[in-house]
Amino acid sequence: MRALRRLALVATLAVISSAQADVALLMRPDVQRFIDEQVAGGELSRAELEAVFANVEAKPNIIAVMDKPSTARPWYQFRPNFYSDKLMQDGVAFWQQNEAALLRAQQQYRVEPEIIVAILGIETRYGRVTGNYRLADALSTLAFDYPRRADFFRAELAEFFRLARSENVNALSLKGSYAGAMGMPQFMPSSFRKWAVDFDGDGHRDIWNNSADAIGSVANYFQLHGWLGGDDVVIPAEVTPGAAIDELVADKFNLHYTVAELKARGVTPSATLRDDALAVLVPLEVAPGDTRYWLGLNNFYTITRYNKSTLYAMVTHELAAEIRNRYLAARYTPAQPAAN
């Protein structure tokens, strides 16, 4: 009995300690200043903000994850994680289940279905892995206890509160990743506010549970970031041995050079491109010590606006192409007659 009483006492103290920590967060001067700023904007009330902050739980483990050094992987190690048979099969199934929404998105936004399908597969395995953190907890932790990027996350936290109000949902009910990314397409709150759409017309932009809204939102994002329907994404290229390409490679997230300028620097595309077309040189280590080159065109650059990684952009392109091939093969393969 004494052991049970001790356990009960420990549990009670833990609850009290947690509640005190939450109240302490609400009363922190930096949190109060944040609340003052939001109330002054006129969109949010002090009562609703304080009600959320009184129930927010700080998540120190998020800081540990954010500060963990990341090691860039070469292409040959990165690619198998996403260019997989499982993702391709699931991508075809998702396409088949959402054909009407994907076709409508292509017609309205001129973004091919396979690109949307590939993005949703890479980001969350079609909604199966969207994150289990309460977004109010994750964003508050990063906004007030992560100085290195506090300004960014305070802005995202402000957008998150506005999102909850505009969508008429409880801010404490929404979940996402440890970094505050949300739903099937993993939009940050500011991205949601700018580019998420109510694609099925039910009055809500539900990118967590509504495939149509997720599809329309990704398509809208791509269109507004310059996607050109029907254009190429990347073209293989050759680089003249000894060519000074360091400057070109370092500028991998910008379309600063024309094809003509790249040719003058020793880069030769494998296909005919307009000399005035903009492109970026993309080196990928396809095997240890073996680097190949591609020219990323406008649509490649657009994918890097979604995720600032040339590896991400390339694997999105390759996965999309293979999902399309498999989808078309399944669609046009005649049904086999039943065995007698």
Image (cartoon, helix red, strand yellow):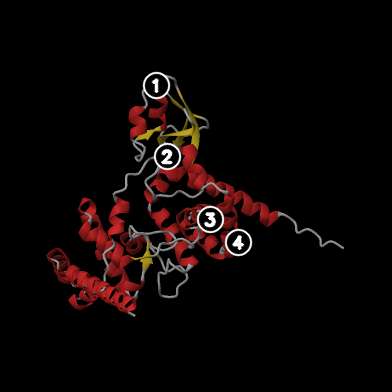
Q: Determine the CA span between mark 3 and mark 1.
A: 38 Å
The residue type indicated by label 3 comes to Pro
- Ranked by sequence position, the earlier of labels 2 and 3 is 2
- Check if mark 4's residue and mark 1's residue have beta carbons within 8 Å: no
Q: Closer to the observer: label 2 or label 3?
A: 2
Q: Quadrant of residue 258?
A: top left
- In the image, residue 41 lies at what x, y percent? 17, 69
Q: Determine the CA span between mark 2 and mark 4.
A: 33 Å
Regarding residue 308, the answer to whether it shows in the image is: yes
Q: Tag 4's secondary structure?
A: helix
Q: Is residue 304 above or below residue 59?
A: above
Q: Is residue 64 left or right of residue 105?
A: left
- In the image, residue 178 lies at what x, y percent? 34, 59
- Ranked by sequence position, the earlier of labels 1 and 2 is 2
Regarding residue 231, the answer to whether it shows in the image is: no
- Ranked by sequence position, the earlier of labels 2 and 4 is 2
The residue type indicated by label 1 comes to Ala
Marking on residue 73: 2
Marking on residue 96: 4
- Check if mark 3's residue and mark 1's residue have beta carbons within 8 Å: no
Q: What residue would you read off at disc 3?
A: 113
Q: What residue would you read off at disc 1?
A: 243
Q: Determine the CA span between mark 2 and mark 3.
A: 29 Å
Please name whichever residue, 247 or 173, is drawn nearer the observer in this view of the structure: 173
